[in-house]
Image (tube, rainbow, N blue to C red):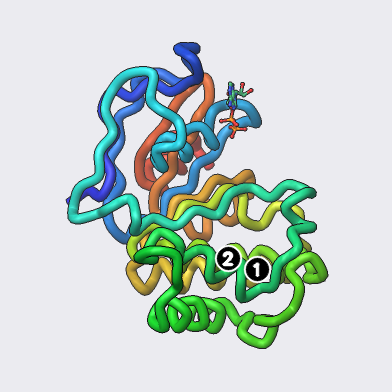
């Protein structure tokens, strides 16, 4: 059963169309890689899935018991965000915000933040300042933050961008193990070797739009 269904979806801003007539279904446990040139609409699609950008037309809905509070998002990092003055623990805990009642984080939510720091191997950095971490450590902090929000689905916008090969491999391994544990992963990437290795499905956005399984994609484009 599909968790997300897009029907005849047209994406854009202020009525201006970027991508037309998108039909697809995302099933639980899939690892969907979104590829395409810069400016083709990958991030816009992700923001539309998150409800941050309204579709120009068409329908998009969640199914199979998926609720918006069960989706975690790791956006692309800007330089300003890299200098954010907070501790690792504070940043990870802020991912639980959609689960708080009132102004306070419960003991369970604080435990959830700690468990997710452990999952991505940053529990020793909890009290460190985020701005003083390496790029790879910062991405793991943001992944732990996204996991605090995500119970079922993780949306990642170029999660290894700017990382050295070892840090990128660490991120990919963590994401793969989350996916193996049942998390649906939707990842924007330009890294075709990662697509080959990890994707179950591919959405390619360009003059030609493709959505299907990885094997269909590789066969269609003779890759
Ligand atoms: P990609 O992620 O594939 O690089 P984007 O989804 O970021 O592409 O952008 C697709 C197009 O939408 C680009 O032409 C971009 O300039 C435009 N765009 C992005 N954000 C906005 C916005 N907030 N308002 C208007 N146009 C935007």
- On screen, residue 62 versus residue 96, left or right, reads left
Image point (46%, 43%), residue name: 218
Residue 69 screen position, x and y as percent: 34, 56
In the image, what residue occupies the spot 51% across and 66% down?
Answer: 175
Residue 165, visible in the rendered structure: no
From this viewpoint, is residue 214 visible? yes
Q: Is residue 86 left or right of residue 99?
A: right
The quarter holding residue 142 reads bottom right
Pointers 2 and 1 in contact (C-beta within 8 Å): yes
> Any atom of ligand 1 within 8 Å of the CB at mark 1?
no
| Mark 1 nearby-residue class (10 Å; few <14, some 14–19, many ≥20) | some
Q: Mark 2 points at which residue?
A: 172
Name the residue furthest top: 16
Q: In which quarter of the image is residue 219?
A: top left
For residue 17, which numbered disc appears in the image? none
Residue 4 percent location from the top left of the image: 28, 44
Query: Could you say whether the residue bearing mark 1 is in a helix, strand or loop?
Result: helix
Where is residue 167? Give x, y as percent. Answer: 71, 69
Q: Residue 80: x, y in percent? A: 77, 49
**149 lies above or below 156:** below
Q: In this view, does 11 lie above or below 49?
A: above
Residue farthest front in this picture: 103
Number of marks drawn: 2
Question: Circle 1 sits on which residue?
Answer: 169
What's the residue at 35%, 65% (across, down)? 101
**Tag 2: Cα neighbours inside 10 Å, few (<14), some, or many (≥20)?**
some
Give the residue drawn at x 20%, y 47%.
63
Between 33 and 8, the residue placed more toward the observer is 8
| Relative depth, front residue between 166 and 117 | 117
């Amino acid at each position: 059963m599909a968790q997300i269904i897009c029907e005849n979806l047209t994406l854009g801003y202020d009525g201006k169309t970027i991508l037309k007539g998108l039909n697809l279904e995302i099933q639980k446990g899939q690892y969907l890689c979104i590829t395409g040139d810069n400016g083709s609409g990958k991030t816009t699609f992700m923001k539309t899935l998150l409800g941050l950008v309204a579709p120009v037309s068409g329908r998009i809905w969640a199914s199979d018991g998926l609720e918006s509070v069960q989706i975690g998002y790791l956006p692309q990092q800007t330089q300003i965000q890299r200098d954010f003055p907070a501790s690792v623990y504070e940043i990870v805990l802020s991912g639980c915000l959609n689960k708080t009642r009132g102004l306070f984080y419960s003991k369970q939510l604080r435990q959830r933040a700690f468990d997710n720091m452990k999952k991505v191997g940053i529990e020793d950095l909890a009290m460190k300042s985020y701005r003083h971490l390496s790029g790879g450590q910062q991405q793991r902090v943001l992944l732990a933050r996204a996991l605090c929000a995500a119970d079922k689905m993780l949306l990642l916008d170029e999660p290894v961008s700017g990382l050295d090969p070892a840090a990128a491999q660490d991120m990919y391994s963590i994401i793969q193990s989350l996916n193996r544990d049942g998390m649906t992963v939707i990842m924007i990437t330009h890294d075709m070797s990662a697509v080959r290795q990890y994707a179950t499905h591919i959405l390619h956005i360009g003059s030609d739009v493709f959505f299907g399984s990885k094997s269909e994609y590789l066969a269609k484009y003779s890759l």
